Amino acid sequence: MKTPRRRVFPVFIPHLGCPQQCVFCDQHEITGCRAPVDPEAVARALSALPDRAGLELAFYGGSFTALPADYQKELLCAALPAREREAVSFLRLSTRPDAVSPGELDLLRRFDVRTIELGVQSMDEEVLRLSRRGHSARDTRDAAHMVKEYGFQLILQMMTGLPGSSEDSDLRTAEELIALGPDGVRIYPAVILRGTELERQWRQGLYREHTVEDAVRLCARIVPRFEANAIPVIRLGLNPTEELSGGQAVGGAYHPALGELVRSRILRQKAEELLSGVSAGSAVTLGVSPRRISAMTGQHRCNIDYLQQTFRLSCVKVAAANTAGEGVVLLASGEKG
């Protein structure tokens, strides 16, 4: 079951509240935001929104609950006039698992924050240590339970391909996040950003690059696990920016359409299951939802070519069918006439 999408008004607070620098992180480049966050500027920006716009104000890029309490209050108070005009209907923020406490949650509840996102990244202690996260898997479990007990919507963020990780450890992280029962997840395969510690390790041969293909293959295994447990994946990969596309992403799993690549791979895997018993030389027609025809075909017809070569088929076509969600059906199979 997917949660309805809301229009988001993002306010980026890059690195604010973060106690140390993770090896992979440069929030200034990821967000494209370098100016300090001024509560008065936030209030002015919100004042330009029309009444009853019903947007969701989201504080991203830092660890909100690790900020000084007075600064948190200033940022939250900046939204009050917009809340009164219903220009903003919901508040959301992201933070660290080790920066969640009853006192912090009481403060956020007083300002009617609805959603808290936890930057988990991994549930493997060695991966957390090598990535310099500064928190433990136990911190994540405790924080997630507390957020849910206080009645907030819980979103968890994980990364794949971090230092010390493997496909198995990333799959275990996904399973542990599923057990925490979040309302949604974001998956961010590791990207090597210029100037980070991760870039230095990569160039010295101390870190093996998590490529786009690595990420697509692994996420095509992870995403169905979340969705089979009614946990929507609300983001796959970093949001494309001019900085990232312009060369700040020097390696790793950066692709402007990574989510589409993963969805395409999931459909291909389902097609492979259907075609396992089809005779070589057959012409087949696969049926998918009309909105999934492009994904099933794949970029530059890569799925069609792969299936045709793998199963030695004479022809593979894709057509619209009355299928639910990501379903794939075999509409026709036989010798090419």
Image: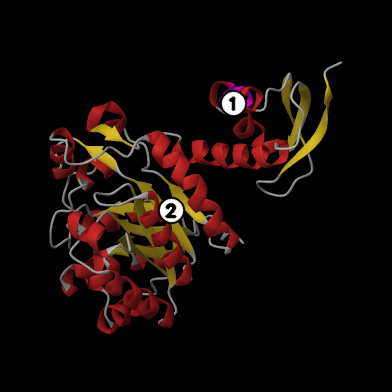
Residue 106 falls left or right of residue 227: left
> Where residue 327 sits: x, y (%)?
69, 46
Protein image colouring: secondary structure
- Residue 337 visible in image: yes
- Image quadrant in which the N terminus is located: bottom right
- Residue 303 lies in magenta, yes or no? yes
Q: Residue at x 21, y 67 (%)?
A: 135
**Which amino acid is tagged 2?**
Val
Residue 6 seen? no
In front: 147, or 51? 147
Q: Nearer the viewer, mark 1 or mark 2?
A: 1
The residue sitting at 53% across, 62% down in the picture is: 231
Location of mark 1 (residue)? 306
Residue type at tag 1: Tyr
> How many marks do you count on the picture?
2
Q: Quadrant of residue 311?
A: top right
The circle drawn on residue 8 is 2
Residue lying at the far top of the rendered structure: 337
